[in-house]
DNA sequence: GCTCTTGTTGCAATCGCGTGCAGGCGCAGG
DNA sequence: CCTGCGCCTGCACGCGATTGCAACAAGAGC
């Protein structure tokens, strides 16, 4: 192991025949350096392969440039799409993303936030789980910004970005009715995230307003397999639903596959299905799923924007975005 | 803005009535501290909300604990699954993942590696693109470990993890022949990654050994849409293939959907299809795709293991893993 | 009682960098 | 020629931690 350590600003300074401060200023935007000095420093830096040490810089500036992304279910289509968008925007605004996966063990969101603090992250974006109040306080007290996405929470301080999940239910209910459906159902998972529950409540309420009842079933996680199980439960009942709103596109895909391939039910002929998220697979022609689009780029943009600009002290800390209904073939009569 | 900065070790030391060194040793595993001192330090730290500053620690130790993940197409099923696995393993071994997305602009792998150097990452894992030789040299010279996954490259230094892509072609060719297929085809993308090309070459060679020719078509990126386009091209030919090996599961899904829904061709009745990657969707009953499984956990495990243990100087720098054939319903007669 | 060993602890140097402050230089104005 | 001004530049300190070294205390062995 050669163990040749990294080149330091001092070595660059020596080679360029200037002081170390000159080197520092050359790499600090807005500092005062003459053109000639800058040129000589840059030459020396290039020759030596010098790169600013962001660790040391962060130490001085008290600002690391790191933003923590706290995520579970990274391999899920919706989450990974959001992740892609957020990382790209962060990079564009000169930040760098630190990814913390909270898949194993719950309460690990707190652990993740501690990690963020140890690395003096400028901010954390939470795409999963709910942090403990005390940790949130700790983050805020240390000047760390916090963004909660789709985690409805009341405590002030963090920016909260949510969708109009409840309204979506209303729109899909009228669509079902217009398609002539009479027996409505809602397929949910057991995880009980606020946004999932809001979709359920909104749908049930809207159906009630139209004078219909909704049979609700909850099972498992928000994935494809749970959708299949839910279909097996709901499609073997005496009063079989002819319209199902699934809390998630993945659930909807599983539900639809079970309906078609296990029960030979035609979709949308005998059964209308709607989902939520508008994942890539929803557009695949095997599913052609009518669903609500997560405004992924808007979510990412608002989050990153809020992190970048020092927001006014008393700005609104809660953003509610709109989930557009994407009409496809899984509901009769677009 | 309160701007109450982070608590430092000095403040903890003052409160606990010990020296700063004692605090440092308390948080350094394996250092020599008496039980009493440790207890008092921990109490003070808890009360003040102290967290080690990894930036400063990294500065001293010359070891940041950061591992850079350089990825493109994060939102793709295979990539995101690999990402999940790698982040989990890294966290288990006390490292933290820094995610760099190279989706926009090519040559940005070099940019990403520079970023990794600036943050003094202990290592980088490259899941996309090929870094420039000079950058690789720069990384290695600074003691930064490098892992290239599915990027066949000759230069020594980095650990290279690859699959037996070429062999896979042989196994699927015999499967096609056994299913009675006579007109073989290979659907590839234009991106020309080494592993994609190896799959193509292996298949063509194996078919030749069996006395058959393969019509090859390449188009677009490795996604679903490209698969559809390829199907439109290949299924409108006078001599229509009755077996297609798609370089990627996503391509296969698009190909299958186009075959069934646009050309009303039955799969596997009139057309056998095989893919590669074994993404989650391959198992969905609409596709039920026979494919080769990427040994994701093995890949991640080998990569992280190699990073953690200081490997012997002259260890083998290249690992070749096996892609298991997963039999499903898209080829006749399993 | 003396010495040696073992285990803790504090001092101070160090890591690589940012930045306030003061001094040097060149130039215009009087 | 002197003064004042503005632009660069270097010095020196500080950021928050780790760690070698030496001092020190306690206990064991003679």
Image: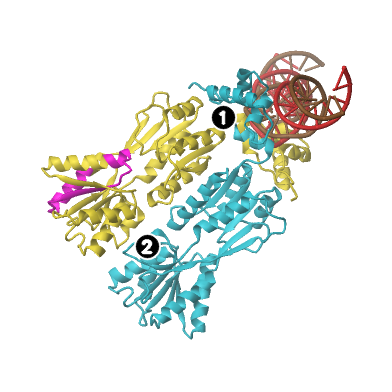
Chain colours: A yellow, B cyan, C red, D brown
Q: Residues within 10 Å of mark 1 (few under 14, many from 20)?
A: some
Whether the magenta-drawn stretch holds residue A190 is answered as: yes
In depth, the one of B306 and A245 nearer the eye is B306
Secondary structure under the numbered disc 2 in the rendered image = helix
In depth, the one of A155 and A295 nearer the eye is A155
Query: Numbered disc 1: what chain?
Result: B
* Residue A26 visible in the current orientation: no
CB under 8 Å between callouts 2 and 1?
no
Q: Which residue is mark 2?
A: B283
Where A216 sits versus A284, above or below? above
The segment highlighted magenta reads A169-197
Where A191 sits versus A157, above or below? below
- Residue D2 lies left or right of residue B204; in this view the side is right
Residue A65 percent location from the top left of the image:
55, 36
- Residue occupying the point 68% across, 38% down: B61
Q: Which residue is mark 1?
A: B51
Query: Numbered disc 2: what chain?
Result: B
């Amino acid at each position: 192991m050669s163990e040749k350590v990294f080149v330091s600003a001092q070595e660059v300074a020596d080679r360029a025949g200037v002081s170390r401060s000159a080197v520092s200023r050359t790499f600090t935007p807005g500092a005062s350096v003459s053109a000639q000095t800058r040129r000589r420093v840059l030459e020396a830096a290039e020759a030596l392969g010098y790169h600013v040490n962001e660790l040391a810089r962060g130490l001085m500036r008290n600002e690391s440039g790191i933003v923590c992304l706290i995520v579970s279910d990274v391999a899920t289509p919706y989450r990974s799409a959001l992740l892609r968008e957020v990382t790209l925007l962060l990079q564009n605004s000169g930040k760098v993303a630190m990814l913390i996966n909270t898949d194993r063990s719950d309460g690990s969101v707190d652990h993740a936030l501690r990690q963020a603090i140890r690395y003096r992250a400028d901010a954390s974006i939470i795409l999963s789980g709910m942090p403990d109040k005390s940790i949130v306080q700790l983050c805020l007290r240390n000047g760390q910004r916090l963004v909660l996405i789709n985690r409805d929470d009341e405590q002030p301080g963090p920016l909260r970005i949510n969708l109009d999940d409840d309204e979506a239910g209303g729109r899909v209910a009228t669509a079902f009715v217009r398609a002539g459906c009479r027996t409505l159902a809602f397929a949910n998972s057991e995880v009980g995230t606020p946004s999932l529950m809001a979709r359920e409540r909104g749908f049930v309420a809207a159906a009630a307003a139209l004078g219909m009842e909704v049979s609700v079933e909850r099972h498992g996680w928000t994935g494809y397999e749970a959708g299949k199980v839910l279909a097996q439960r709901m499609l073997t009942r005496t009063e079989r639903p002819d319209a199902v709103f699934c809390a998630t596109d993945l659930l909807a895909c599983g539900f639809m596959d079970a309906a078609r391939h296990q029960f030979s039910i035609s979709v949308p002929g005998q059964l209308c299905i709607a989902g939520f998220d508008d994942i890539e697979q929803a557009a695949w022609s095997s599913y052609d799923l009518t669903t609500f689009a997560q405004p992924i780029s808007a979510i990412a943009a608002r989050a990153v924007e809020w992190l970048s600009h020092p927001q006014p002290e008393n700005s609104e800390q809660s953003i509610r975005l709109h989930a557009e209904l994407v009409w496809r073939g899984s509901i009769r009569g677009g």
